Amino acid sequence: MNSKPKQILLRISSILMLTTALPMLLWCWNLINNAALDYTYAGLGCFAAGIVYIFSMITAIAGLAFAGRPHRHRWCRILAYIQLAAGVILVVPLLAYAALTLPPLFLLTILYLFGAGWHEKRDSEQQ
């Protein structure tokens, strides 16, 4: 059962994800030179963080497109889990820069997952 507040939360988190993705992408890519001077792989991590923010645009568009269709929320969850895993993996190369670049990604992805549901409900759970 997909409630109206969850649909609204999915739409709001998708809109927020879309509006923050482009500025964060540009900011991550502007940090590449400084990060490369501080840590060995931090420049590469900032570039990869920018790519993950591009992927978050795709996740947000899927959330907006499928918010009213509960049977399609599985796709939203898959994209959000991929995005969350990529963010966790990026903590290693980013080191201290992870605290600067990744909090909006994590917060909005978790909010998105609350809207899409954390797991798929089976027929027995739906009744």
Image (cartoon, rainbow, N blue to C red):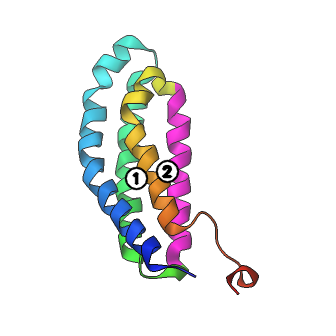
Q: Is residue 44 above or below residue 11?
A: above
Relative to 60, does residue 7 appear above or below in the rendering?
below
Residue at screen point 38% across, 12% down = 38
For the residues labelled 1 and 2, the Cα–Cα distance comes to 7 Å
Tell me the element at label 2: helix
- Residue occupying image coordinates x 35% and y 12%: 37
Residue 87 image position (x, y, % from top left): 50, 41
Instruction: Give the residue drawn at x 50%, y 57%.
Output: 80
The residue pinned by badge 2 equals: 83
Let me know if residue 52 is in the magenta part: no
Is the Cβ of the residue at disc 1 closer than 8 Å to that at disc 2? yes
Q: Of all residues shown, which one is farthest toward the bottom?
A: 127
Quadrant where the N terminus is found in the figure: bottom right
Q: Residues within 10 Å of mark 1 (few under 14, many from 20)?
A: some
- As drawn, the residue found furthest toward the right would be 124
Q: Is residue 44 visible?
A: no
Lower sequence index among marks 1 and 2: 1
Q: Locate the C terminus and report the quarter of the image it occupies.
A: bottom right
Q: What segment is highlighted magenta in the picture?
A: 72-92
Residue on which the image places disc 1 = 55
Residue 67 appears in the picture as rendered:
yes
State the image coordinates of residue 121 (x, y, percent, origin top left): 67, 75
Residue type, label 1: Phe
Q: Secondary structure at mark 1?
A: helix
**Main SS class of the magenta portion in the image:** helix
Which sits in the foreground, 99 or 76?
99
Q: Amino acid at mark 2?
A: Gln
